[in-house]
Image: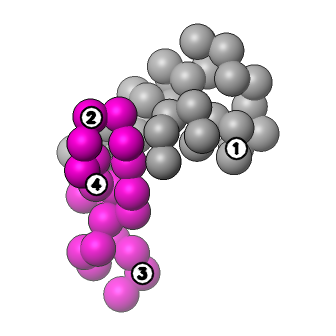
Amino acid sequence: MTCQEITAALGLAAVPASVEGVRSKMKRLADRGWADEPSPGRFTLAAGPACGS
């Protein structure tokens, strides 16, 4: 999902400030192993132990 799609799914307004906040949080989650960033700006859930295993 893109950050705009994630922002909309969370029920937030798709304004640049909200999208950038979500992007920052998703980057942090990717660094911690909770999310993957297969291509720049697109995020998925990580397949590792953080997925509830």
Mark 4 surroundings within 10 Å by alpha-carbon count, few (fewer than 14), some (14 through 19), many (20 or more): some
As drawn, the label of residue 10 is: 1
Q: What is the CA distance from the residue labelled 3 to the residue labelled 2?
A: 25 Å
Q: Nearer the viewer, mark 4 or mark 2?
A: 2
Disc 4 marks which amino acid? Asp
Give the secondary structure at mark 4: strand
Q: What is the CA distance from the residue labelled 2 to the residue labelled 1?
A: 21 Å
**Magenta residues, as a range?**
33-53
**Is the Cβ of the residue at disc 3 closer than 8 Å to that at disc 4?**
no
Disc 2 marks which amino acid? Pro
Q: What is the CA distance from the residue labelled 4 to the residue labelled 2?
A: 10 Å
Q: Is residue 43 left or right of residue 2?
A: left
Give the secondary structure at mark 1: loop
Residue drawn where x is 25% and y is 75% of the image: 48
In magenta stretch: residue 43: yes
How many numbered badges does the structure rendering display? Answer: 4
Give the secondary structure at mark 2: loop
**Is the Cβ of the residue at disc 4 closer than 8 Å to that at disc 2?**
no
Where residue 53 appears, as percent x and y from the top left, is 36, 87
Which circle's residue, 4 or 1, is located before the other in the chain? 1
Where residue 44 appears, as percent x and y from the top left, is 39, 57
Q: Which residue is mark 4?
A: 36
Q: Which residue is mark 2?
A: 40
Which circle's residue, 1 or 3, is located before the other in the chain? 1
Which circle's residue, 3 or 4, is located before the other in the chain? 4
In magenta stretch: residue 27: no
Query: Is residue 50 shown above or below 53?
Result: above
As drawn, the label of residue 52 is: 3
Q: What is the CA distance from the residue labelled 1 to the residue labelled 3?
A: 21 Å
Q: Nearer the viewer, mark 3 or mark 4?
A: 4
Disc 3 marks which amino acid? Gly
